[in-house]
Image (cartoon, helix red, strand yellow):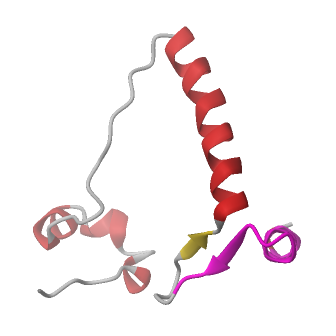
């Protein structure tokens, strides 16, 4: 499914691979689709009393060290910002 999905969204020109490994760029039609999906989920969340929150994209290394056991499986894929 994963391979088919990625091929489909690329052929539909919705997304492209970003310049940084593991990232994707939302193209205009892909972004419109994303906004519609987000809006529908937001309606459902609000109707059930769920409150939205936003977390930072950059997390201090010390946080990962505290959770070393949980991070171990995906640590090689983590991007490290040094400046």
Q: Report the front residue among 4 and 20.
A: 20
User: Where residue 11 appears, x then y in whole percent?
Assistant: 87, 76
Residue shown at the point (40%, 86%) measured from the top left: 76
Q: In which quarter of the image is residue 51?
A: top left
User: Where residue 7 appears, x then y in whole percent?
Assistant: 85, 77
Residue shown at the point (46%, 87%) measured from the top left: 20
Judge whether 61 appears above or below 29 on screen: below
Q: In the rendered view of the protein, which quadrant contains the C terminus?
A: bottom left
**Magenta region: which residues?**
3-18
Q: Report the front residue among 7 and 1.
A: 7
Q: Report the front residue among 56 and 32.
A: 32
Judge whether 65 appears above or below 81 on screen: above
Q: Report the front residue among 19 and 1.
A: 19
- Left or right placement of residue 70 versus residue 1 in this view: left
On whether residue 11 falls in the magenta region, the answer is: yes
User: Where residue 33 appears, x then y in whole percent?
Assistant: 71, 49
Judge whether 44 appears above or below 79 on screen: above
Farthest residue, direction front: 28
């Amino acid at each position: 499914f994963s391979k088919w999905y990625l091929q489909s969204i690329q052929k539909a020109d919705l997304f492209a691979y970003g310049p940084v490994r593991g990232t994707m760029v939302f193209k205009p039609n892909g972004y419109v689709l994303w906004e519609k999906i987000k809006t529908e989920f937001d309606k459902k969340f609000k109707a059930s009393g769920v409150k939205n929150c936003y977390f930072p994209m950059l997390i201090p290394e010390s946080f990962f060290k505290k959770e070393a056991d949980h991070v171990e499986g995906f640590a090689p894929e983590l991007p490290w910002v040094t400046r």
